[in-house]
């Protein structure tokens, strides 16, 4: 194989490797294959510090003109060799991240092409000065972020009040300012995972078909009236003389499939992966490290984790049939009131009832890990709920439908289209009942699930109480170092803005 080496005097101060050449792939063009290598150097600046542009995994160099990992490089090569035609089973807006990249070949290929991967992208033996400067600037940006994290987390010192992602030069969290931005075309962008299971929440990229969504331009489709089904919906009581719905089996099947797909497409991790690592619990030394954290540091860490999880819940809601047809005020009200409840429901997927541990920050954590928060009664409540819900052995479809039912609660304050939401919630409950019957679940399980709603609300109420108490002691920590979305959802200072936005 013929090799052409970059002019070292042009790039030696820019890119080096960690003891191996950086290989830039190319295609055979009727002549010997051409590959470009950069010689080894001991300087810490490296192309590999930039994550894969496709899935966010650790990159291995420039492949087909774009910085990617080995997995995405191989996928793109195979797609070009076979001239394959892929189809998307969903809505052509699948999330592509490290854990979900193999689920939809169509959306993965479209993202490869969108970021510039091409068979012809590496036919030149030299990079232009503009390309070198741009790449060098990006490397420097990632190096600076890494150095900040390394410097701020010296051994024996408490971690700084910053999350592990989107760190700005002043060390503060960089997140969106309000919930309407998350609804209007936003998909979650969490922290970069260092390994297959090193982070609870994984990076995913914006859905291409939703990035420019104009909520105000969406016209609600008419919802027809239905015949009565009295006494079936304890959390849905019409106040305007409206009737309860009866729907066809085909409509229930469609709604159940839509919600299940929305759920699976917006989970941070696969349940199968977590079940394989339940044995990876924190060692006693690691538990003590968490217990020795300053209270405000641990609070901010948990606030960041909750915020990341809620971003996925927002995306889940957006994909549920009927949600985007609601007015923006009601979308915000439902998410503000119900997003944390859905996070607690989803927690059962990552809960090990045998060891009484939950997956957190890379391993399975016991209640003792959260001691420095200073709210042991609340943590006990969380673990009790997780164990209780886990004992019901819900399937993914059942978790999805129960989450949607909780999210579409029509009894929230400040709703403008209450009847419309009541009808949607009732249809979701019928779909949930249909799935439970199809799964041959025991009698009474639907009632047990509905009883969990009051527990969820009590749990979220306890969280609010603890946050208010913490904020009274550390107002500047909350104001300056907590994620804006978290503050908007859970602190009173953001409530007027929420009502005005609506």
Image (tube, grey):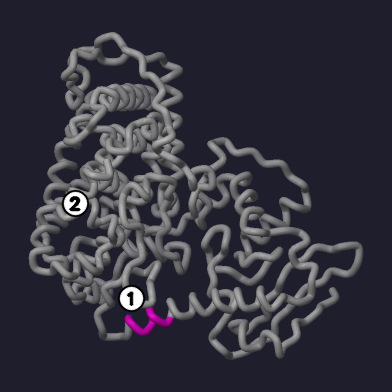
Write down the residue under mark 2. 382
Asked where in the image residue 189 lies, by quadrant, the reply is: bottom left
**Residue, x 43% and y 35% (percent of image)?**
217
**Residue, x 10% and y 54% (percent of image)?**
465
Q: Is residue 465 above or below residue 238?
A: below
Query: Disc number at residue 373?
Result: none
Q: Secondary structure at mark 2?
A: helix
Q: Nearer the viewer, residue 286 or 7?
A: 7
> Percent position (x, y) of residue 337?
22, 42
Asked where in the image residue 240 lies, by quadrant, the reply is: top left
Asked where in the image residue 475 lies, by quadrant, the reply is: bottom left
Write down the residue under mark 1. 171
- For the C terminus, the image quarter is top left
- For the N terminus, the image quarter is bottom right
**Magenta span of residues:** 147-152
How far separated are the C-alphas under marks 1 and 2? 31 Å
Secondary structure mostly seen in the magenta stretch: helix
> Percent position (x, y) of residue 372?
16, 69
Relative placement, left or right, of 493 versus 6 is left
**Residue, x 19% and y 69% (percent of image)?**
477
Q: Nearer the viewer, residue 353 or 323?
A: 323
Q: Secondary structure at mark 1?
A: loop
Evaluate whether residue 383 shows in this view: no
Residue lying furthest top:
227
Relative placement, left or right, of 501 versus 108 is left
Reply yes or no: does residue 254 show up in magenta: no
**Residue, x 54% and y 36% (percent of image)?**
90
> Percent position (x, y) of residue 284?
25, 73
């Amino acid at each position: 194989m013929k090799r052409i080496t970059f002019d070292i005097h042009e790039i030696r101060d820019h890119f080096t490797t960690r003891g191996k050449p950086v290989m830039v792939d190319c295609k055979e063009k009727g002549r010997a294959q051409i590959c470009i290598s950069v010689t080894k150097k001991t300087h810490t600046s490296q192309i590999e510090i930039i994550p894969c542009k496709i899935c966010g995994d650790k990159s291995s160099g420039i492949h087909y003109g774009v910085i990617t990992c080995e997995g995405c490089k191989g996928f793109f090569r195979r797609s070009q060799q076979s001239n394959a035609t892929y189809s998307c089973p969903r809505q052509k807006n699948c999330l592509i991240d490290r854990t979900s990249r193999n689920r939809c070949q169509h959306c993965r290929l479209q993202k490869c092409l969108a970021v510039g991967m091409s068979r012809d992208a590496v036919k030149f033996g030299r990079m232009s000065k503009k390309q070198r400067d741009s790449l060098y600037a990006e490397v420097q940006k990632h190096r600076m972020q890494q150095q900040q994290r390394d410097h701020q987390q010296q051994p024996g010192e408490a971690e700084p009040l910053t999350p592990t992602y989107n760190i700005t030069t002043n060390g503060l969290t960089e997140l969106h300012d309000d919930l309407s931005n998350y609804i209007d075309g936003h998909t979650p962008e969490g922290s970069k995972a260092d390994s297959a299971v090193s982070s609870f929440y994984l990076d995913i990229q914006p859905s291409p078909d939703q990035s420019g969504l104009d909520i105000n331009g969406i016209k609600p489709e008419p919802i027809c009236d239905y015949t009565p089904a009295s006494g079936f919906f304890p959390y849905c009581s019409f106040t305007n003389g409206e009737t309860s719905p009866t729907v066809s089996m085909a409509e229930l099947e469609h709604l159940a499939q839509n919600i299940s797909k929305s759920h699976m497409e917006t989970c941070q991790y696969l349940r199968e992966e977590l079940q394989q690592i339940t044995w990876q619990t924190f060692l006693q030394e690691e538990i003590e490290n968490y217990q020795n954290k300053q209270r405000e540091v641990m609070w901010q860490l948990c606030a960041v984790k909750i915020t990341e999880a809620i971003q996925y819940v927002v995306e889940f809601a957006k994909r549920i049939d009927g949600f985007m047809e609601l007015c923006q005020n009601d979308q915000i009200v439902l998410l503000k009131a119900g997003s944390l409840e859905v996070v607690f429901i989803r927690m059962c997927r990552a809960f090990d009832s045998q060891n009484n541990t939950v997956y957190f920050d890379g391993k399975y954590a016991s209640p003792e890990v959260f001691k420095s928060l200073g709210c042991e009664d609340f943590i006990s409540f969380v673990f009790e709920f997780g164990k209780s819900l886990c004992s019901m052995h819900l399937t993914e479809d059942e978790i999805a439908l129960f989450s949607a039912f909780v999210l579409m609660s029509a009894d929230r304050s400040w709703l403008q289209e209450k009847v419309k939401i009541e009808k949607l919630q009732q249809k979701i409950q019928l779909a949930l009942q249909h799935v439970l019957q199809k799964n041959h679940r025991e009698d009474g399980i639907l009632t047990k699930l509905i009883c969990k709603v009051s527990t969820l609300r009590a749990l979220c109420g306890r969280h609010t109480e603890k946050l208010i108490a913490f904020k009274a002691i550390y107002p500047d920590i909350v104001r300056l170092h907590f994620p804006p979305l978290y503050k908007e959802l859970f602190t009173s200072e953001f409530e007027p803005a929420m009502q005005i936005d609506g």
